[in-house]
Image (spheres, helix red, strand yellow):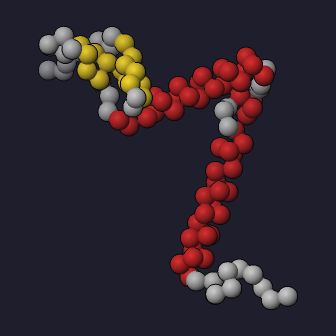
Amino acid sequence: MEEVVRVVGIGVSLHGLSLCKYNSMSRLVPLADKNSSVFMGVAAYLIFGSWLNYNRYSARGWDLVPHSDTIRDLPYLFRDWIRRVVETVQGGGSRGGYSAV
């Protein structure tokens, strides 16, 4: 038989946000594991940041998202990081990337 759970609030701790319920001993226990707490934290950050950008700067579109420039650059940053790792593993010579003048 499935247990019916009633959500009674959102618990806030140093580790993030989590949905909570009361157990049989009337103690507040988290409903979710760490993965969903990370998701809740990221979602709260994006929602609050978007709200703040909308109200403070009248931002629209991509400008609503907090740190949108960094988020848009992530694929390129990752590609550059992979290239750097590959070059380091392959070994690029002893000149450190400089050429003779």
| Residue drawn 40% across the image and 29% down it | 14
Residue 77: quadrant of the picture: bottom right
Asked whether residue 85 is in view, the answer is: yes
Residue at the extreme right of the image, as rendered: 101
| Residue drawn 32% across the image and 28% down it | 32
Reply above or below: 23 against 41.
Answer: above
| Foreground of the two, 71 or 6 | 71
Query: How many numbered marks, from 0 up?
Result: 0
| Residue drawn 46% across the image and 28% down it | 40
Residue 33: quadrant of the picture: top left
| Residue drawn 64% across the image and 87% down it | 94
Q: Quadrant of the C terminus?
A: bottom right
From the viewer's perspective, tell me whether residue 1 is left or right of residue 9. Answer: left
Q: Quadrant of the N terminus?
A: top left
Q: Position of residue 58 (x, y in %)?
A: 79, 20
Reply above or below: 91 against 33.
Answer: below
Q: Position of residue 16 (x, y in %)?
A: 42, 29
Residue 85: quadrant of the picture: bottom right
Q: Position of residue 12 (x, y in %)?
A: 40, 21
Asked whether residue 5 is in view, the answer is: no
From the viewer's perspective, tell me whether residue 57 is left or right of residue 29. Answer: right
Q: Position of residue 89 (x, y in %)?
A: 53, 78
| Foreground of the two, 98 or 20 | 98
